[in-house]
Image: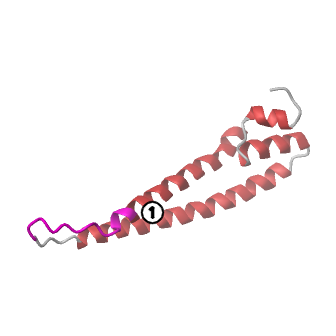
């Protein structure tokens, strides 16, 4: 595994966290009460199984979300420690700006006084 692949793992985890966050919100919106229509015939239906299923999905997604948050911060802490363990300060600056601050290389070059 290259250094770029290793450091890019944080981004993949962030993407998964964002996905679970959106999915959790989508299910929560589905669980909200719907509007009542009085113009239709009253038919008794059972939605409890669907609601129970959606709640189970929501709990599962929220558990995965929380687990990923823990993994993310643990991995981020390890990466920060490894980056700051480098002896060359320019390498430290570039890696922090690129992989933790997510800046484009052009901006990093400008900030560090290099031509892009």
Quarter of the picture containing the N terminus is: top right
Viewer-side residue, 62 vs 79: 62
Viewer-side residue, 29 vs 36: 36
**Is 32 a magenta residue?**
yes
Residue at 73 percent of width and 49 percent of height: 100
Quarter of the picture containing the C terminus is: top right
Relative to 107, is 58 on the left or the right? left
Magenta segment range?
Answer: 29-42
Is any atom of residue 2 visible in this view? no
Q: Main secondary structure of the magenta part?
A: loop
Q: Is residue 95 above or below residue 76?
A: above
Relative to 92, is 68 on the left or the right? left
| Secondary structure category for the residue under label 1 | helix
Is any atom of residue 25 visible in this view? yes
Residue 27 on image: x %, y %: 38, 62
Residue at 34 percent of width and 63 percent of height: 30
Residue at far front of view: 39
Residue at 49 percent of width and 53 percent of height: 19
**Is 86 a magenta residue?**
no
Residue 96 on image: x %, y %: 78, 46
What residue would you read off at disc 1? 61
Quadrant in the rendering for residue 57: bottom left
Mark 1: few, some, or many residues within 10 Å (few <14, many ≥20)?
some
Residue at 62 percent of width and 60 percent of height: 71
Quadrant in the rendering for residue 113: top right
Residue at far top of view: 115
Residue 98 on image: x %, y %: 74, 41
């Amino acid at each position: 595994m290259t250094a770029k692949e290793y450091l890019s793992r944080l981004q993949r985890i962030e993407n998964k966290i964002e996905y679970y966050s959106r999915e959790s919100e989508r299910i929560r919106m589905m669980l909200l009460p719907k509007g009542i229509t009085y113009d239709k015939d009253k038919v008794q239906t059972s939605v409890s199984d669907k609601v129970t299923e959606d709640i189970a999905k929501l709990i599962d997604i929220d558990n995965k979300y929380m687990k990923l948050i823990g993994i993310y911060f643990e991995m981020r802490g390890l990466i920060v420690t490894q980056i700051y363990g480098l002896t060359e300060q320019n390498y430290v600056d570039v890696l922090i700006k690129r992989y933790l601050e997510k800046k484009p290389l052009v901006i990093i070059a400008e900030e560090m006084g290099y031509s892009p």
